[in-house]
Image (spheres, rainbow, N blue to C red):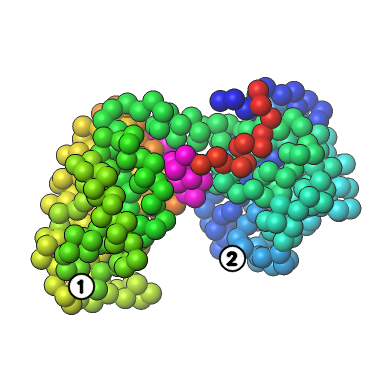
Amino acid sequence: MAKLNVSDIDVKGRRVLMRVDFNVPLENGKVANDKRLRAALPTIRHILAHDGRLILMSHLGRPKGKRVPELSLKPCAAALQTLLGQSVAFVDDCIGEKAEAAVQTLSDGQVLLLENLRFYKAETDNDETFARSLADLAEVYVNDAFGTAHRAHASTAGVTRFLQPSAMGFLIEKEIAYLGDALQQPKRPFVAILGGAKISGKIDVIDALLPKVDRLIIGGGMAYTFFKAKGLEIGGSLVEADKLDLARALMEKGGDKLVLPVDCLCSDQFDFNARTVGSLTPTAVDAIAADSIGLDIGPASISTFESILAGAGTVVWNGPMGVFEIDATAKGTYAVARALADATQNGAVTVIGGGDSAAAVEKAGLADRMSHISTGGGASLEFLEGKVLPGVAALTDR
Protein backbone atom coordinates (compact mmCIF):
# COMPACT_ATOMS: atom_id res chain seq x y z
CA MET A 1 0.00 0.00 0.00
CA ALA A 2 2.35 2.72 -1.28
CA LYS A 3 -0.28 5.50 -1.25
CA LEU A 4 -1.40 7.83 1.53
CA ASN A 5 -4.44 6.70 3.52
CA VAL A 6 -7.03 9.03 5.04
CA SER A 7 -5.76 8.05 8.51
CA ASP A 8 -2.29 9.37 7.55
CA ILE A 9 -3.48 12.97 7.24
CA ASP A 10 -4.67 15.59 9.73
CA VAL A 11 -8.14 16.75 8.68
CA LYS A 12 -9.04 18.85 11.75
CA GLY A 13 -10.52 22.19 10.69
CA ARG A 14 -9.64 21.50 7.03
CA ARG A 15 -11.93 21.31 4.03
CA VAL A 16 -11.81 17.71 2.73
CA LEU A 17 -13.03 17.02 -0.82
CA MET A 18 -14.01 13.34 -1.01
CA ARG A 19 -14.95 11.40 -4.15
CA VAL A 20 -17.58 8.79 -3.31
CA ASP A 21 -19.55 6.38 -5.50
CA PHE A 22 -23.20 7.28 -4.88
CA ASN A 23 -24.28 5.94 -8.28
CA VAL A 24 -27.34 4.29 -6.75
CA PRO A 25 -30.79 3.29 -8.07
CA LEU A 26 -33.56 5.83 -7.43
CA GLU A 27 -37.29 5.08 -7.22
CA ASN A 28 -39.94 7.76 -6.76
CA GLY A 29 -37.29 10.30 -5.82
CA LYS A 30 -35.73 8.13 -3.11
CA VAL A 31 -32.65 5.89 -2.89
CA ALA A 32 -33.82 2.32 -3.61
CA ASN A 33 -30.60 0.59 -2.50
CA ASP A 34 -28.20 2.31 -0.09
CA LYS A 35 -25.41 -0.30 -0.28
CA ARG A 36 -22.93 2.12 -1.89
CA LEU A 37 -23.73 4.82 0.65
CA ARG A 38 -23.09 2.36 3.48
CA ALA A 39 -19.78 1.31 1.89
CA ALA A 40 -18.50 4.89 2.21
CA LEU A 41 -19.57 5.34 5.85
CA PRO A 42 -16.30 4.27 7.57
CA THR A 43 -14.29 6.97 5.76
CA ILE A 44 -17.04 9.59 6.13
CA ARG A 45 -17.36 8.91 9.87
CA HIS A 46 -13.57 9.00 10.33
CA ILE A 47 -13.29 12.46 8.74
CA LEU A 48 -16.24 13.87 10.69
CA ALA A 49 -15.04 12.36 13.98
CA HIS A 50 -11.68 14.08 13.41
CA ASP A 51 -13.39 17.46 12.83
CA GLY A 52 -12.88 17.63 9.08
CA ARG A 53 -15.18 19.82 7.00
CA LEU A 54 -16.40 17.23 4.52
CA ILE A 55 -17.39 17.97 0.92
CA LEU A 56 -18.72 14.86 -0.89
CA MET A 57 -18.87 14.57 -4.69
CA SER A 58 -20.18 11.80 -6.93
CA HIS A 59 -21.78 11.02 -10.27
CA LEU A 60 -25.20 9.41 -10.74
CA GLY A 61 -26.28 7.74 -13.97
CA ARG A 62 -25.37 9.06 -17.39
CA PRO A 63 -26.70 12.60 -17.85
CA LYS A 64 -24.03 13.13 -20.57
CA GLY A 65 -23.11 16.68 -19.60
CA LYS A 66 -26.68 17.93 -19.25
CA ARG A 67 -28.63 18.87 -16.12
CA VAL A 68 -31.16 16.04 -15.70
CA PRO A 69 -33.39 16.66 -12.63
CA GLU A 70 -34.20 12.93 -12.28
CA LEU A 71 -30.47 12.26 -11.78
CA SER A 72 -29.95 14.78 -8.99
CA LEU A 73 -27.97 13.56 -5.98
CA LYS A 74 -30.37 15.31 -3.59
CA PRO A 75 -32.10 12.02 -2.57
CA CYS A 76 -28.64 10.71 -1.56
CA ALA A 77 -28.26 13.59 0.89
CA ALA A 78 -31.52 12.59 2.58
CA ALA A 79 -30.52 8.89 2.70
CA LEU A 80 -27.05 9.70 4.02
CA GLN A 81 -28.54 11.96 6.69
CA THR A 82 -30.56 8.97 7.97
CA LEU A 83 -27.51 6.68 7.96
CA LEU A 84 -25.25 9.20 9.71
CA GLY A 85 -27.79 10.50 12.18
CA GLN A 86 -26.71 14.08 11.48
CA SER A 87 -27.57 16.85 9.06
CA VAL A 88 -26.24 16.54 5.49
CA ALA A 89 -26.29 19.79 3.50
CA PHE A 90 -26.86 19.73 -0.26
CA VAL A 91 -26.03 22.27 -2.96
CA ASP A 92 -27.42 21.99 -6.51
CA ASP A 93 -24.08 22.57 -8.24
CA CYS A 94 -20.58 21.12 -7.90
CA ILE A 95 -18.47 24.11 -8.98
CA GLY A 96 -18.91 27.88 -9.13
CA GLU A 97 -20.36 30.48 -6.78
CA LYS A 98 -23.16 28.32 -5.32
CA ALA A 99 -20.80 25.47 -4.43
CA GLU A 100 -18.15 27.85 -3.07
CA ALA A 101 -20.68 29.67 -0.87
CA ALA A 102 -22.04 26.36 0.50
CA VAL A 103 -18.52 25.17 1.33
CA GLN A 104 -17.80 28.38 3.27
CA THR A 105 -20.71 27.70 5.64
CA LEU A 106 -19.23 24.36 6.81
CA SER A 107 -17.97 24.06 10.37
CA ASP A 108 -15.77 21.30 11.81
CA GLY A 109 -17.53 17.92 11.72
CA GLN A 110 -20.15 19.00 9.16
CA VAL A 111 -20.85 17.48 5.74
CA LEU A 112 -22.01 18.81 2.37
CA LEU A 113 -22.97 16.85 -0.76
CA LEU A 114 -22.38 18.50 -4.15
CA GLU A 115 -24.66 18.02 -7.16
CA ASN A 116 -24.01 15.35 -9.83
CA LEU A 117 -20.53 15.79 -11.35
CA ARG A 118 -21.65 14.44 -14.72
CA PHE A 119 -24.04 17.33 -15.25
CA TYR A 120 -20.79 18.74 -16.68
CA LYS A 121 -19.22 16.98 -19.68
CA ALA A 122 -15.91 18.39 -18.38
CA GLU A 123 -15.96 15.74 -15.63
CA THR A 124 -15.59 12.72 -17.95
CA ASP A 125 -13.31 14.73 -20.26
CA ASN A 126 -10.93 15.22 -17.30
CA ASP A 127 -10.97 18.92 -18.16
CA GLU A 128 -8.21 20.85 -16.40
CA THR A 129 -10.28 23.95 -15.63
CA PHE A 130 -13.10 21.85 -14.16
CA ALA A 131 -10.64 19.81 -12.07
CA ARG A 132 -9.07 23.03 -10.76
CA SER A 133 -12.52 24.39 -9.85
CA LEU A 134 -13.20 21.25 -7.80
CA ALA A 135 -9.78 21.47 -6.15
CA ASP A 136 -10.37 25.12 -5.21
CA LEU A 137 -13.18 24.02 -2.88
CA ALA A 138 -10.87 22.22 -0.46
CA GLU A 139 -7.46 21.74 1.16
CA VAL A 140 -7.29 17.93 1.18
CA TYR A 141 -8.53 15.27 -1.28
CA VAL A 142 -9.72 11.75 -0.47
CA ASN A 143 -10.82 9.17 -3.06
CA ASP A 144 -13.06 6.38 -1.77
CA ALA A 145 -14.90 5.62 -5.03
CA PHE A 146 -13.45 2.29 -6.12
CA GLY A 147 -16.24 1.90 -8.69
CA THR A 148 -14.75 4.78 -10.73
CA ALA A 149 -11.06 4.28 -9.88
CA HIS A 150 -10.47 2.82 -13.37
CA ARG A 151 -11.58 6.11 -14.96
CA ALA A 152 -9.23 9.07 -15.42
CA HIS A 153 -11.90 11.71 -14.80
CA ALA A 154 -11.58 15.22 -13.35
CA SER A 155 -12.85 14.10 -9.92
CA THR A 156 -10.67 10.96 -9.75
CA ALA A 157 -7.39 11.93 -11.41
CA GLY A 158 -7.40 15.55 -12.62
CA VAL A 159 -8.17 17.06 -9.21
CA THR A 160 -5.02 15.53 -7.66
CA ARG A 161 -2.82 17.77 -9.83
CA PHE A 162 -4.09 20.80 -7.91
CA LEU A 163 -4.92 19.37 -4.49
CA GLN A 164 -2.38 17.72 -2.20
CA PRO A 165 -2.26 15.68 -0.11
CA SER A 166 -4.48 13.19 -1.94
CA ALA A 167 -5.29 10.03 -0.01
CA MET A 168 -7.33 6.87 -0.40
CA GLY A 169 -10.28 6.09 1.85
CA PHE A 170 -10.87 2.88 3.78
CA LEU A 171 -13.08 1.34 1.05
CA ILE A 172 -10.45 1.64 -1.68
CA GLU A 173 -7.84 0.35 0.76
CA LYS A 174 -10.02 -2.70 1.53
CA GLU A 175 -10.74 -3.36 -2.17
CA ILE A 176 -7.06 -3.28 -3.12
CA ALA A 177 -6.07 -5.37 -0.11
CA TYR A 178 -8.49 -8.18 -0.99
CA LEU A 179 -7.94 -8.11 -4.75
CA GLY A 180 -4.19 -7.60 -4.37
CA ASP A 181 -3.76 -10.45 -1.89
CA ALA A 182 -5.86 -12.73 -4.08
CA LEU A 183 -3.49 -12.10 -6.98
CA GLN A 184 -0.15 -11.79 -5.19
CA GLN A 185 -0.46 -14.05 -2.16
CA PRO A 186 -3.36 -16.43 -2.76
CA LYS A 187 -4.11 -19.18 -0.30
CA ARG A 188 -4.08 -22.24 -2.57
CA PRO A 189 -5.71 -23.83 -4.41
CA PHE A 190 -6.55 -20.53 -6.16
CA VAL A 191 -9.74 -20.80 -8.25
CA ALA A 192 -11.16 -18.11 -10.53
CA ILE A 193 -14.71 -18.26 -11.89
CA LEU A 194 -15.55 -16.16 -14.93
CA GLY A 195 -19.05 -15.93 -16.36
CA GLY A 196 -21.21 -13.43 -18.16
CA ALA A 197 -22.30 -13.03 -21.73
CA LYS A 198 -19.16 -12.38 -23.73
CA ILE A 199 -15.62 -13.68 -23.86
CA SER A 200 -14.48 -10.38 -25.44
CA GLY A 201 -14.92 -8.47 -22.17
CA LYS A 202 -12.88 -11.02 -20.22
CA ILE A 203 -10.03 -11.93 -22.62
CA ASP A 204 -7.42 -9.92 -20.73
CA VAL A 205 -8.63 -11.28 -17.38
CA ILE A 206 -8.39 -14.90 -18.59
CA ASP A 207 -4.93 -14.18 -20.02
CA ALA A 208 -3.75 -12.53 -16.79
CA LEU A 209 -5.23 -15.16 -14.46
CA LEU A 210 -4.25 -18.38 -16.25
CA PRO A 211 -0.60 -18.33 -15.08
CA LYS A 212 -1.67 -17.52 -11.49
CA VAL A 213 -4.63 -19.80 -10.79
CA ASP A 214 -4.86 -23.53 -10.15
CA ARG A 215 -8.27 -23.76 -11.89
CA LEU A 216 -10.21 -21.30 -14.02
CA ILE A 217 -13.91 -22.12 -14.31
CA ILE A 218 -15.80 -20.71 -17.31
CA GLY A 219 -19.58 -20.33 -17.26
CA GLY A 220 -22.31 -18.11 -18.66
CA GLY A 221 -22.89 -17.19 -22.28
CA MET A 222 -19.17 -17.06 -23.06
CA ALA A 223 -18.87 -20.84 -22.57
CA TYR A 224 -20.73 -21.41 -25.86
CA THR A 225 -18.00 -19.67 -27.85
CA PHE A 226 -15.58 -22.26 -26.41
CA PHE A 227 -17.98 -25.12 -27.31
CA LYS A 228 -18.31 -23.78 -30.87
CA ALA A 229 -14.51 -23.52 -31.08
CA LYS A 230 -14.39 -27.24 -30.22
CA GLY A 231 -16.67 -27.93 -33.18
CA LEU A 232 -19.79 -28.63 -31.11
CA GLU A 233 -23.36 -27.76 -32.10
CA ILE A 234 -24.63 -24.90 -29.90
CA GLY A 235 -27.98 -24.17 -31.59
CA GLY A 236 -29.16 -20.62 -31.00
CA SER A 237 -26.92 -20.09 -27.97
CA LEU A 238 -24.90 -16.92 -27.59
CA VAL A 239 -21.67 -16.99 -29.61
CA GLU A 240 -18.97 -14.58 -30.71
CA ALA A 241 -18.08 -15.96 -34.11
CA ASP A 242 -15.03 -13.68 -34.42
CA LYS A 243 -13.53 -15.06 -31.18
CA LEU A 244 -13.36 -18.77 -32.07
CA ASP A 245 -9.61 -18.76 -32.80
CA LEU A 246 -9.02 -16.91 -29.56
CA ALA A 247 -11.09 -19.47 -27.63
CA ARG A 248 -9.00 -22.29 -29.14
CA ALA A 249 -5.77 -20.49 -28.18
CA LEU A 250 -7.01 -19.99 -24.60
CA MET A 251 -7.99 -23.66 -24.30
CA GLU A 252 -4.56 -24.67 -25.55
CA LYS A 253 -2.85 -22.26 -23.17
CA GLY A 254 -5.04 -23.25 -20.22
CA GLY A 255 -4.91 -27.02 -20.65
CA ASP A 256 -6.36 -28.81 -17.61
CA LYS A 257 -6.57 -25.52 -15.68
CA LEU A 258 -9.47 -24.34 -17.84
CA VAL A 259 -12.74 -25.94 -16.69
CA LEU A 260 -15.79 -25.70 -18.97
CA PRO A 261 -19.36 -26.81 -18.18
CA VAL A 262 -20.18 -30.42 -19.07
CA ASP A 263 -23.92 -29.82 -19.43
CA CYS A 264 -26.36 -26.94 -19.72
CA LEU A 265 -30.06 -26.15 -19.40
CA CYS A 266 -31.54 -25.77 -22.87
CA SER A 267 -34.87 -24.48 -24.16
CA ASP A 268 -36.35 -23.85 -27.59
CA GLN A 269 -38.16 -20.72 -26.34
CA PHE A 270 -36.57 -17.67 -24.76
CA ASP A 271 -37.54 -13.99 -24.57
CA PHE A 272 -35.22 -11.95 -22.37
CA ASN A 273 -37.22 -8.71 -22.59
CA ALA A 274 -40.41 -10.47 -21.49
CA ARG A 275 -38.39 -12.50 -18.94
CA THR A 276 -39.95 -15.74 -20.23
CA VAL A 277 -38.41 -19.10 -21.05
CA GLY A 278 -39.86 -22.41 -22.28
CA SER A 279 -39.39 -25.78 -20.58
CA LEU A 280 -35.74 -26.43 -19.71
CA THR A 281 -33.90 -29.68 -20.39
CA PRO A 282 -30.51 -30.63 -18.87
CA THR A 283 -28.36 -31.42 -21.93
CA ALA A 284 -24.78 -32.61 -22.31
CA VAL A 285 -22.71 -29.97 -24.11
CA ASP A 286 -22.05 -32.36 -27.01
CA ALA A 287 -25.78 -33.01 -27.49
CA ILE A 288 -27.27 -29.52 -27.90
CA ALA A 289 -29.97 -29.53 -30.59
CA ALA A 290 -29.84 -27.11 -33.51
CA ASP A 291 -33.11 -25.47 -32.40
CA SER A 292 -32.08 -25.16 -28.72
CA ILE A 293 -30.60 -22.31 -26.71
CA GLY A 294 -28.28 -22.89 -23.74
CA LEU A 295 -29.35 -20.62 -20.85
CA ASP A 296 -27.66 -21.92 -17.68
CA ILE A 297 -25.20 -24.54 -16.51
CA GLY A 298 -26.75 -27.96 -15.82
CA PRO A 299 -26.77 -30.19 -12.70
CA ALA A 300 -23.61 -32.13 -13.67
CA SER A 301 -21.69 -28.88 -14.17
CA ILE A 302 -22.96 -27.58 -10.82
CA SER A 303 -21.70 -30.77 -9.16
CA THR A 304 -18.28 -30.47 -10.89
CA PHE A 305 -17.89 -26.80 -9.93
CA GLU A 306 -19.01 -27.46 -6.34
CA SER A 307 -16.36 -30.16 -5.86
CA ILE A 308 -13.61 -27.82 -7.16
CA LEU A 309 -14.78 -24.96 -4.92
CA ALA A 310 -15.09 -27.19 -1.84
CA GLY A 311 -11.31 -27.57 -1.70
CA ALA A 312 -10.39 -24.01 -2.70
CA GLY A 313 -8.22 -21.69 -0.59
CA THR A 314 -8.93 -18.50 -2.59
CA VAL A 315 -11.80 -17.87 -5.02
CA VAL A 316 -12.36 -14.84 -7.25
CA TRP A 317 -15.73 -14.74 -9.03
CA ASN A 318 -16.85 -12.36 -11.78
CA GLY A 319 -19.91 -13.02 -13.92
CA PRO A 320 -23.08 -15.17 -13.67
CA MET A 321 -23.38 -18.77 -14.88
CA GLY A 322 -26.56 -18.16 -16.88
CA VAL A 323 -29.43 -15.74 -17.41
CA PHE A 324 -29.73 -15.04 -13.69
CA GLU A 325 -32.31 -12.27 -14.19
CA ILE A 326 -34.89 -15.07 -14.76
CA ASP A 327 -35.46 -17.40 -11.79
CA ALA A 328 -35.68 -20.56 -13.92
CA THR A 329 -32.21 -19.93 -15.40
CA ALA A 330 -30.57 -18.57 -12.25
CA LYS A 331 -30.07 -21.95 -10.54
CA GLY A 332 -26.44 -22.36 -11.67
CA THR A 333 -25.47 -18.88 -10.50
CA TYR A 334 -27.13 -19.39 -7.10
CA ALA A 335 -25.52 -22.82 -6.73
CA VAL A 336 -22.08 -21.24 -7.26
CA ALA A 337 -22.98 -18.52 -4.73
CA ARG A 338 -23.91 -21.19 -2.15
CA ALA A 339 -20.71 -23.13 -2.90
CA LEU A 340 -18.67 -19.95 -2.27
CA ALA A 341 -20.53 -19.29 0.99
CA ASP A 342 -19.68 -22.85 2.12
CA ALA A 343 -16.05 -22.41 1.02
CA THR A 344 -15.81 -19.19 3.06
CA GLN A 345 -17.14 -21.04 6.10
CA ASN A 346 -14.43 -23.66 5.55
CA GLY A 347 -11.70 -21.01 5.63
CA ALA A 348 -11.39 -19.94 2.00
CA VAL A 349 -11.00 -16.28 1.00
CA THR A 350 -13.83 -15.46 -1.41
CA VAL A 351 -13.82 -12.25 -3.46
CA ILE A 352 -16.85 -11.31 -5.57
CA GLY A 353 -15.88 -8.96 -8.38
CA GLY A 354 -18.82 -6.59 -8.38
CA GLY A 355 -21.42 -6.20 -11.13
CA ASP A 356 -23.85 -9.06 -11.80
CA SER A 357 -22.02 -11.47 -9.46
CA ALA A 358 -22.46 -9.05 -6.57
CA ALA A 359 -26.14 -8.59 -7.49
CA ALA A 360 -26.64 -12.36 -7.61
CA VAL A 361 -25.00 -12.89 -4.22
CA GLU A 362 -27.18 -10.13 -2.72
CA LYS A 363 -30.31 -11.58 -4.35
CA ALA A 364 -29.45 -15.03 -2.99
CA GLY A 365 -29.17 -13.55 0.53
CA LEU A 366 -25.56 -14.73 0.85
CA ALA A 367 -23.69 -11.40 0.84
CA ASP A 368 -22.69 -11.63 4.50
CA ARG A 369 -21.17 -15.07 3.93
CA MET A 370 -18.50 -13.87 1.46
CA SER A 371 -15.07 -12.52 2.47
CA HIS A 372 -15.41 -9.46 0.24
CA ILE A 373 -17.85 -8.13 -2.35
CA SER A 374 -16.31 -5.50 -4.60
CA THR A 375 -18.22 -2.26 -5.16
CA GLY A 376 -16.74 -1.87 -8.65
CA GLY A 377 -17.32 -4.40 -11.44
CA GLY A 378 -15.27 -2.60 -14.11
CA ALA A 379 -12.56 -1.51 -11.68
CA SER A 380 -12.15 -4.99 -10.20
CA LEU A 381 -11.90 -6.52 -13.69
CA GLU A 382 -9.18 -4.06 -14.72
CA PHE A 383 -7.34 -4.71 -11.45
CA LEU A 384 -7.49 -8.47 -12.13
CA GLU A 385 -6.11 -7.79 -15.61
CA GLY A 386 -3.10 -6.15 -13.97
CA LYS A 387 -3.95 -2.68 -15.23
CA VAL A 388 -3.07 0.47 -13.30
CA LEU A 389 -6.17 2.21 -11.90
CA PRO A 390 -5.82 5.96 -12.66
CA GLY A 391 -7.83 6.97 -9.58
CA VAL A 392 -5.37 5.13 -7.33
CA ALA A 393 -2.18 5.93 -9.26
CA ALA A 394 -2.95 9.67 -8.98
CA LEU A 395 -2.92 9.62 -5.16
CA THR A 396 0.01 10.90 -3.09
CA ASP A 397 2.79 8.39 -2.47
CA ARG A 398 3.44 7.52 1.15
Q: Quadrant of the N terminus?
A: top right
- Where on the picture, by quarter, is residue 156? top right
Q: Which residue is mark 2?
A: 28
What element does badge 1 sit on?
loop
Instruction: Name the amino acid type tagged 2.
Output: Asn
Residue 59 shows in this picture: yes
The quarter of the displayed image where residue 287 is located: bottom left
Q: Position of residue 258 (x, y in %)?
A: 24, 45
Above or below for 138 versus 148 = above
**364 shown above or below 215:** below
Residue 201 locus on image (x, y percent): 42, 56
Q: What residue type is disc 1 on?
A: Gly
Give the x, y percent position of residue 44: 65, 35
Magenta-colored stretch includes residue 378: yes
Part of the protein shown in magenta: 369-386
| Closer to the camera in the image, 259 or 315 | 259
- Residue 76 bears which disc, if any? none
Is 62 on the left-hand or right-hand side of 352?
right
Residue beneath label 1, please? 235
- Residue in the picture at 26% in, 35% down: 214
